[in-house]
Amino acid sequence: MLRTVVLLVSLLVVMSSACVATPVLKVGEELAGALTAGGEAAYSLELGTEYFVYGAAMQKSVDVIITVTGPDGAEVGVFDVSGEGLDYFQFQSTIEGLYGITIKPFEDGAGEFSVLLYMTEALAETPAGKVDQLMVRYANDATPGAIIAVVEDGEISFQKAYGMANLSHGIPLTTTTITNIGSTSKQFTAFAINLLVKEGKLSFDDDVRKYLPEVPDFGETVTIGHLLSHTSGYREYLNGIAMSGRMLDEGDYIDRDEILALVMRQPELQNSPGAEWNYCNTGYSLLALIVERITEKGFDVWMKEKVFGPLGMGNTQVRMHRSSIIKNSAQGYVAFQSLGFREVPDISASVGAGGIYTTVADLALWMKNLHSGEVGGKEVIEKMTTPLVLTDGDESAYGMGLVIDEFQGLRRIQHGGGDSAHRSTFAYFPEIDKGVITLSNNGSYSRGIADKVVEAFFAENLTPAETLAETQNEFDASNYQPEGFDEIVGRFELEGIDLILTFSREDDVFYCQATGQPRTTIVPTANLEFNIEAVDAAINFHRGDDGDISSLTLHQGAGITGNRLADEAWVPDAEEMATYTGRYFSNELEAFYEIVVDGDDLVLKHRRFSDAKLQIKKKDVFLVASPLRELSFVRSDEGILTGFAASNGRTRGVFFERVN
């Protein structure tokens, strides 16, 4: 049995050079504090070996960063998840002694906060106990939570629900709660297409226009296979609709017909079909429409008859409209400032790309079929789990509706999903016939939890991360010299997704900030290698021929290259700034934006969004907060500004014409 230990915490408030002792903090007792710009509050915590610690800082009027250090001075973890409300921290002790918890303001912030230690207890020894500790943040009646399931040899060996399915009505999650799995749905759409191919009703090489003649002829053939593999060249409809002024995070409605209409208004392909992998919900939405046109049945009806029924997935269905009633389903929630949570409706028109509601038990049946191929046949499963080869010969990590990669020495077949507020993870390890499924109705839920569950239950089958690191490069993060990060500090532009990553450091804390997003901490894992723990990503920096850091690779799903930008940016004078002002219209998105001068800044305005300052990238190219992200201005041969091309990750080069 786990033993809860009440520990005393000494609070040290540093003011100038004086240290003043404060009342001790006990488990369950909240302690208020205040921060000045550049100040900090330091706490200490005496722990034995292998203890689990869980607490939080309430950010009352200041955004804080929480850093935990061990008795040896090594950094245990940095926590900075949100800018307001609760910032949680949890860690485990590895050596006995005094641990430090330091709270600093984000950037030059100042204000009030409080800190509360919820729990300190002996580290669990069983896999189930480790998962309970991992999920402690969600295990209460005031938080939307998650369902965890472990599958071994086709059967569920562990399953447990944490938190609430519906906060308004006080309904807890159970292991039978039906939940939106978001993009994890794609593997079922891909399976449906494979069944139709097997029946001879279509071919992977068929031109999409054979079934959707409304789609323009772009001069190159886009096939069914291109839709399945995210290589079609069609724009991502979610990004495009957001760029048009729709607020998806606020529940704006999208009709399925709008997706086809967007493709019809697209002037050209973003890439040659098959040449570039660019994750695209549009393709999977079109695949669902193609299934309907071939079978002459609604996608939900055909999937129930031909996929879910034969698999025995009796609690699985396609939600064709977000207002449809799904009995025993979980409501989705996102964090809402310091007030807790707010309800968020599903993304509408997600059929094919998402929109499936299911249970962990039904997904376990599907996982079993990935092993047996009883429904559909093993040749279909093999086709879906074979990585795509691009036209240049490079191999993608994507098959058909599934990602194929490796985790701690084991081959993994997986896909994650996220709707407006639901999150899901499906991970299967075919070499050991085991897997993990997580379903959540909490928009802040991290997919990294699934990896921790895998480590807890399948440890004997994994190669520890430390061992893998040793085989690559011996590296001791505690010996990393902060000054060594200075050659990395600067801006790097990611290729193909119109995003700039800015790297900086404050003393021994290192930061990465993407365009229009809050900065997050990164930690060294090897020479010139860092992890972005908040988003489960890694970065490798590379030296150029001159020995300077000139580029990077971001590993988040597929690898993305980034190149260093010059430190000195072009600065327009007042006359040059005025040339960018005016109203701009996109026929493709049917949307207006306006650019005005406000003091020393150019500002982008839209009737539904907050004003956003343009940040200079280089002459005629500016960065701005989502949903546009990058504006590349276009000029005539005479140098007259005629418009700009807007890019937002998966949707690139949308032209906005200057109209005044």
Image: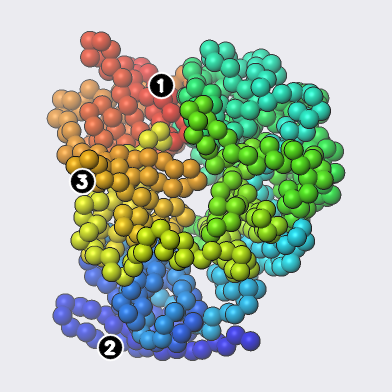
Q: Residue furthest front?
A: 471
Residue 198 lies left or right of residue 579; in this view the side is right
Q: Are the residues at dot 3 and dot 2 in contact (C-beta closer than 8 Å)?
A: no
Answer with mark 2 or mark 1, whichever residue precedes in sequence. 2
Of badges 3 and 2, nearer the viewer stands: 3
Answer with mark 3 or mark 2, whichever residue precedes in sequence. 2
Instruction: Say the numbered circle drawn on residue 21.
Output: 2
Per the image, the residue denoted by label 3 is 547
User: Residue 95: x percent and y percent?
Assistant: 41, 82
Per the image, the residue denoted by label 1 is 655
In space, the residues marked 3 and 2 are separated at their CA atoms by 49 Å
At mark 3, the secondary structure is loop
Instruction: Say the numbered circle drawn on residue 576.
Output: none
Answer with mark 3 or mark 1, whichever residue precedes in sequence. 3
Q: Residue at x 31, y 16 (%)?
A: 642
User: Residue 643: x percent and y percent?
Assistant: 33, 20
Q: Quadrant of residue 376?
A: top right
